[in-house]
Each structure stands twice: as structure tokens, then as C-alpha cells.
Image: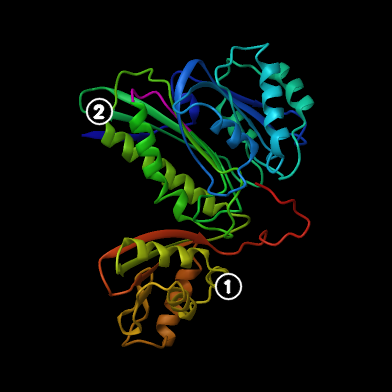
Amino acid sequence: MFDIISLKNGLENVDGFYFGGVNAGFKKDSNDLGFIRSDEAYDVSAVFTSNKFKAAPIRHFLSYPKNFKTNFILLNSKNANAMTGQNGIDDINFIFESLSQKINLINPIMSSTGVIGYRLDTEKIISAFDKMDFNSKDSNGVASAIMTTDSFKKELAFRVELENGGYFNIAAICKGAGMINPAFATMLCFILTDANIPKEDMDEILFGSVKHSFNAISVDGDTSTNDTLMLLTSRKTEFYDKAAFREVINLITKQMALYLVQDGEGSKKVVSFGVSGAKNDEEAEIAAKALSNSLLVKTAIFGEDPNWGRIASTIGASKVECKEENLVIKYDEVIVFNKDLPQLDEQRENLAHNIMKKPSYKISCDLGIGEGKFEAYGCDLGHKYVDINSDYRS
């Protein structure tokens, strides 16, 4: 048995790490360069974008030996350092060579977000090191440093209290808005813990958490070059429970994923798409993600249009096994379609329309074929979705 307790603030709840952020001159008046540091090298687990054009920071990470340990992560916004070739990796190495003259570095990591196709301004970054307090514990500082089009800071922290009286802490920061697709969300997310967790459990639990969180959301159907999810442990407590750790990691990744949808390039509504009764879980996932990714469905959500035809059409187009006479569609608890009620009467249409006015609700689709189920998450097309003057960001 265990209890999961929500904590105020963020990364400062976890023992063994330092963090903060400064303005290096890429943004006008807010942090754009941050760090996460430890006195000794710790295990790190990571999941990256499925985009074939992985950004230089990810390629730099992957150049290290398997199961390497690190004591430093450098984070920047406004520049993704993506599609910059070997020069992008060389720039990272140059930055860390300079930083190593100030502090001890062990297999340092860089993570970037911003405009694609431009090399880093290494001079600005290196000059900003003089402003950094590498012994600070400023979670807000590092969380704000990775924000780009985010409209709010994304930060969570929990304490897990075990039945034997032990406890451990887990906290996370995340950024992301736009370029969010069920092939991983456009985001940077860093999770810190002081639990005494084995490395193999870190990998297993982190990878397992992605399927029903970051890989189950969609905003605009694109997949970024820089998507990164990392977990680091200081093991400063002697305590650990695998079931408890799995539950809290799933809680963090699920909530962060929903924050991303909520903040998705001006979106105003968060909608879950629950598909049940599919031939199997795989087909349920295909149908649910088709719904969360459909531009026609997104525009219907934005227009608060209860026309179920776009839902049915999208399921049929996904090529999963389905039959018209078996299909049931509900908006929350209101049935908008089944074989006996193919047309919306005025009462049900009004009820469905009122549900669609809410900031969040669920569209449930029972295919009536088998036992497969999956839930995906999407949003409307917000007012910031089309901006011909915006840079192509990651």
C-alpha cells in the first residue's frame, strides 16, 4: 500500500539536484537558458521523437555509450538546433568545452526547442554562464527557460509515502504547445526523483508510460524533431516501490500530456476519444487516434457542432473493423447515434450542443465488435492555429 501526495512547487521537492534559468538574450525579458545539475553522475532514461530528422541535441545524446550516466543538462529555447548537421553537434561540444572550465561535467546533455534550421548562438550561451548560479534550486527558473508558445508553466511534484514509513519524491517540468501528434507530443519533459530505483525499472516504467499519455494526444498532427522525455534519479532516499513508482509516473505523464493538449496553439477545448468494443486494442488505438487527429473533427469541436457524421466517417476511414448497425456514439452520457436513433432530435441535439460548449468532455464510440479499447486526447483548432507569420518551430 502507498499514498501519493501532491506537493507545492516543483523540482525543489527532489533531493540531489540543482536547477535554474537565466536570460541569455534570445527572449526579450524572460529566461531562455536553463540547467539541471547534480554533484555526481546519475542514471538517465530517455524517450525521443519518432521523426527521422532528429535534432542535434538528440543525436549528441545518442552518441554516448548505452546506459551512460550524466551530471548536467543544458536547456535552451528559441532555437531547436535541428537540421543543422554535424555543425549542430560540434556547437554543443564547443559549448560544453567552455562550460567545463567553470564546473565539473560528466557526459553533459543538451536539450533545445525553438526555430528549426539555425545554428546556436554559442557566444550568447557561453556568455550567459557567468550569470548562472549552479547551486540554485529555482524550479520556476528552469521551467520558464524552456517555454516557447506555452501560455502557462507546466510543473508537477508528488511524494509517495510507503506502508513501511519510507517515502520518495518525484517532480517534473514540461513545455509544449503545437506540433503535437500521436507519434509523440511536441515537448520537452524532465522528471526527477530521489527514489532508489534500478536503471532497468527506470527504462521499463518510462517507456511504458508513453503509450497512454504523450503518444495518445494530438493537436495539429505534426511530429517535432526535438521531442524529449527524460527521467533521472539521485537515489538520495533508500526507498522504492515499483508499483507506486509506476503509478506516479503514469500520473505525471498523463497530466502533462493533457496540459499539452490544453495549451495546444490556442486551443480552448480538451476532448477525450474513447473507443471500445473494437476487434482488439490495436484497432481501438487506430480508431481513437484517427479521431484525435482528424481536422474535420477538430473543426467540429471548435464550432461546437454535434453532427456525429464526422465521428462515424473518421472511424470508417480508419479501416478498422466496424459495422453501422453496431456503432454507438455518445457525447459524455448523451447518445447521439445508434441504429435505433440515427437522427438527432431537437432535445438530444441541444443536450449534445451544451456538452460541446464545455472546456472538456468525452466522445465515446462503441464499435460493438470485440473487447478492444483505447483512449486518445485531442482539442479544437484554436485561434492561434493558423499564423502565416510564425516561424516553423520544434
Specify the quadrant that holds the N terminus: top left
For the record, the magenta segment spans: 191-197
Q: Where in the figure is residue 187, as x and y percent of width and height?
A: 56, 44
Picture residue at 58% right of the left edge, 36% below the top: 58
Magenta segment includes 192: yes
- Nearest to the observer: residue 355 or residue 132: 132
Left or right placement of residue 57 versus residue 6 in this view = right
**Picture residue at 35% right of the left edge, 37% below the top:** 204
Residue placed most toward the observer, 44 or 327 = 44
Q: Decide whether residue 231 is among the magenta residues.
A: no
Looking at the image, is mark 1 or mark 2 earlier in the sequence?
Answer: 2
Residue hosting label 1 = 303
Mark seen at residue 162: 2
Residue occupying image coordinates x 73% and y 26%: 125
In the image, 269 versus 195, the foreground residue is 195
Which residue is located at x 66 percent, y 60 percent? 385
Label placed on residue 368: none
Left or right of 282: which side holds 64? right
Q: CA distance from mark 1 to mark 2?
A: 47 Å
Local SS, label 2: strand
The answer to whether one can see residue 362 in this image is no
Residue 381 location, x and y as percent? 60, 64
**How was the colour assigned to the protein in this rendering?**
rainbow
